[in-house]
Image (tube, rainbow, N blue to C red):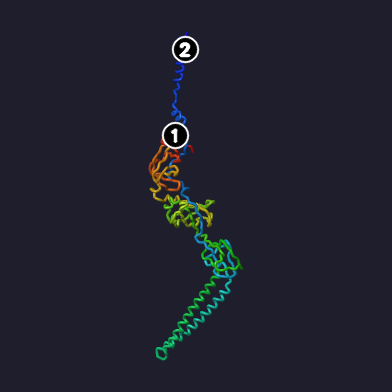
Amino acid sequence: MKKSLMAAAVAVAVVAAGCGGNKPVTPPQAAAQVVQKPVGVRAVTPAAQLESSVLQATGSVRARQAATLSAQASGPLTRVTVDVGDKVKRGQVLAQIDASNARIAADQARASKAAAEAALDGATTEVERARTLAQSGSLPRASLDKAEVGYRQAKAQVEQAAAALASAQEALRDASLTAPFDGVITSKSKNQGDYVSPGTAIFGLVNTDALEVRAAVPEAFVDRVKMGTLVKGTLNPSGAPFEAKVRSLGATIDEQTRTVEVLADVLPAKDEGARLRAGALVELDFSATLASDDAQAQAGLFLPAQAVNAKGQQGFVWVVRDGKAQRRDVKVERVLPGFVRVVQGLGPAERVVADASLPLQDGTAVQVVQ
């Protein structure tokens, strides 16, 4: 009986061992590897060329000729001939200051000049007679010297009178406020009857036919913008197109924005589209300007700067291959804010992790999510 119980116990143990043999024990490290999930990443493919939007710069329109016209004389305004919005021509009288006193002063100066000229005529006749008599010995030397002095004094008085007349005439002209160039009246601060004095602002004048765009261009591509080249622009917010010609490039870089000031002259519109006005915001597209550069300078594969971990020209990217991250050393060149050009180490069809700062290693399982 005891032998039968022992045999049964051994049989049970053997069966239990056999069942357990179908499920081997999994080491803790292996179990951790089984439950590890792929890291979700965004991936990008290198672009053969940059989108035009990254080659744009925001600017503002301003007039190349703008002036505040102020009074040059004192007195009440007797006439104001223009209003805000009026187009005026160069030399056109815009306002008249009471010129009665200036006119009287000019008349007096003119009369004084005429009297001085008459005295000079008499002194000229006198000195010529004295010179003739002195040559024949009929006139003492002292009398000739006196005549010479009288002549020089008369001549100086004529010059003095002429200067006084010119000053009076200038004061008379100052009583009339004229346009220094063609343009449009943008402001008027005084009306007929108001008293003004030298320096009192009366009108604002802007030449609307000579406009320029001031744009802050990123330093990364400003050196490829050439003076004299044409750029296309659009007016905000209407989107109306226009063209401008680059006139000057700034000599310094703004330390805060890392941009360079570019000035471009607005070209006359070819059709009756939206008219640009001083103060308007515009977008300048420099993509055509850069595309006209040599092919060697434009060749390459472009990536967002965030996708590359680089110091200077040397760096690396994470390439997605067979569901795993693979480190790839690359050589890059910064071309625009936020973008680099990969010149070595990467193919055009490879997918690159968009954020190179992720804590990845060679062989890390990744899953591309968009």
Q: In the rendered view, does 191 fall on the left or right side of 59?
A: right
Mark 2 or mark 1, whichever is nearer to me:
2
Q: How many marks?
A: 2
Question: How far across and how far down the image is residue 300, in percent?
Answer: 40, 45
Location of residue 103 with respect to 55 vertically, above or below: below
Mark 2 or 1 closer to N-term?
Answer: 2
Res. 323 image quadrant: top left
Q: Residue furthest top?
A: 1
Rendered position, 245 above or below 160? above
Query: Which residue is painted at 43% across and 86% down in the image?
Result: 145
| Dot 1 crowding, Cα within 10 Å, few <14, some 14–19, many 20+ | some
Asked if residue 103 lies left or right of residue 325, the reply is: right
Q: Tag 2: residue type?
A: Ala
Compared to residue 106, the image places residue 328 above or below, namely above
| Amino acid type at image mark 1 | Ala
Outermost right residue:
193
The mark found on residue 8 in the picture is 2
For the residues labelled 2 and 1, the Cα–Cα distance comes to 51 Å
Residue 5: x, y in percent? Answer: 47, 11
- Farthest residue to the bottom: give it: 138
Q: Name the residue that disc number 1 marks.
A: 365
Residue at (57%, 72%) from the top-left corner?
99
**Closer to the camera, 85 or 68?**
68
Mark 1 residue element: loop
